[in-house]
Image (cartoon, helix red, strand yellow):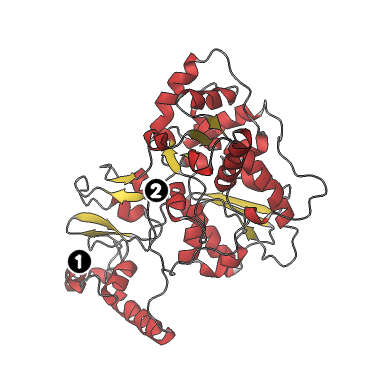
Amino acid sequence: MRKYEHSVLLDPEKCTGCTTCLRHCPTEAIRIKNGRATINSDRCIDCGACIRYCPQGAKRAVTSSLSDMDRFKWKIALPAPTLYGQFDNLEDVDYVLNGLLKIGFDDVFEVSKAAELVSAYTRLYLQTDGIKKPAISSACPVILRLIALRFPSLEEHVVHMLPPMEIAARLAKEEALKKHPELSPEDIGVCFITPCPAKVSYVKNGFAGYKSMVDEVVPINDIYFLLIGEMHKLENMDNLSESGRIGIGWARSGGEATAIFNEDYLAADGIENVIHVLDQVENGNIPPLEFIELNACTGGCVGGVLSMQNPFIAKARLQTLRRYMPISQNSLPKDTSYIPADYLFEELPEYQSISKLGNTIAESMRMMADIQSFKATLPGIDCGSCGAPTCRAFAEDVIKKTACPEDCRLKDVWHQDGCKDKEV
């Protein structure tokens, strides 16, 4: 199995071992060892929660810079819809698109345009016989990795549609080759302007065996001040926008789901809420639904850790901006009855489930029994002093021999003082 390349990294020099990240990691990928945090790459889903909550700034996203695009003759920017919500009093997205040309790009292709096409094809997908309902959106790479690692039984529910970013990259390159036949495919570079580190990981690793068509990923907060400076200088603008309310709406939670034009949907955002929803789906405790949209970031992509603005303010700005836009500028021909193969993927990437303990069922059952037995001897207060986020996680570490029983600082004191029978 190919090693997964992550975009979230730890700077050990800045880490103080404060356990803040330990408590906020949704997959329990972080441990504190020798006074410093460590990240288990097999568990990390690149959600960016540790970046958001680390008070020392010891977690960071490894991204590209604008200069990385200099190796290409023709440079195309792919702005995420979230980018439009970063600017106060923005009345026309063409200010942003023309600004991107001013900071060094030769062309722009809106991801929101591709999002409208994906929305149209998703409506067609949901009419396909034999698909597992509720269908779960494949747009957020954090959700796909979370499902593969923690909820593998739900993989058959995932919509086998490539995300708008990937579709936009392919369409942008095809369009550039048609407009500029003197260029070769190697001359054209595509740069996605991202609100989150998970998209960086997506590009690094490719998807389901396919190399991403995106060449570089630059965070919104890296180009924000450069871009806004050029936007303020604009006097004349070209009409570049080719998307409407549906495409822009993908930046916020519920935007993708409402675009399927079916009321039988659920939209959840924030990684803890997402995990709760997936638990309910796995246990069959949800009403009959057609579609589920899940976003790891609070508020949707507007809540990405690499954005500049408060997600709720960005969402409000997008609401205002959308009022003056057409519903959509991209639709399918009325006689469309199938989804092009290059919009689809065959199967999800293969990851080892984090719930797997042993190599065989018998070994896993024995280890589970050992974990429960050892956990019963622990205080059960999830204090984190052992370096694990919970007593259950620590017990698993001990049984897997990645931690020592003595790492629990309270275990002996707890039993000696009779604390176990007292309220804490």
Q: Where is residue 187 in the image (x, y as percent from the top left)?
A: 49, 39
Task: Provide the secondary structure element on which disc 2 rests.
Answer: loop
Using the rendered view, name the quadrant where residue 353 is placed: bottom left
Considering the image in quadrants, where does the C terminus appear? Answer: bottom left
Q: Can residue 184 be seen in this view?
A: yes
Q: How far apart are marks 1 and 2 (CA)?
A: 31 Å
Residue at 58 percent across and 45 percent down: it is 170
The residue lying toward the viewer, choosing from 234 and 411, is: 234
Task: Provide the secondary structure element on which disc 1 rests.
Answer: loop
Considering the image in quadrants, where does the N terminus appear? Answer: bottom left
Disc 2 marks a residue whose amino acid type is Gly
Disc 1 marks a residue whose amino acid type is Leu
Of all residues shown, which one is farthest toward the top? 235
Q: Where is residue 74 in the image (x, y as percent from the top left)?
A: 50, 34
Q: Can residue 189 be seen in this view?
A: no
Q: Is residue 418 left or right of residue 334?
A: left
Residue at 32 percent across and 61 percent down: it is 40
Of all residues shown, which one is farthest toward the right? 335
Q: Position of residue 146 (x, y in %)?
A: 47, 60
Residue 315 numbered mark, or none? none
Crowding at dot 1, Cα within 10 Å, few <14 / some 14-19 / many 20+, comes out as some
Crowding at dot 2, Cα within 10 Å, few <14 / some 14-19 / many 20+, comes out as many
Pointer 1 residue = 410
Pointer 2 residue = 48
Residue at 51 percent across and 25 percent down: it is 101
**Mark 1 or 2, which is nearer the eye?**
2
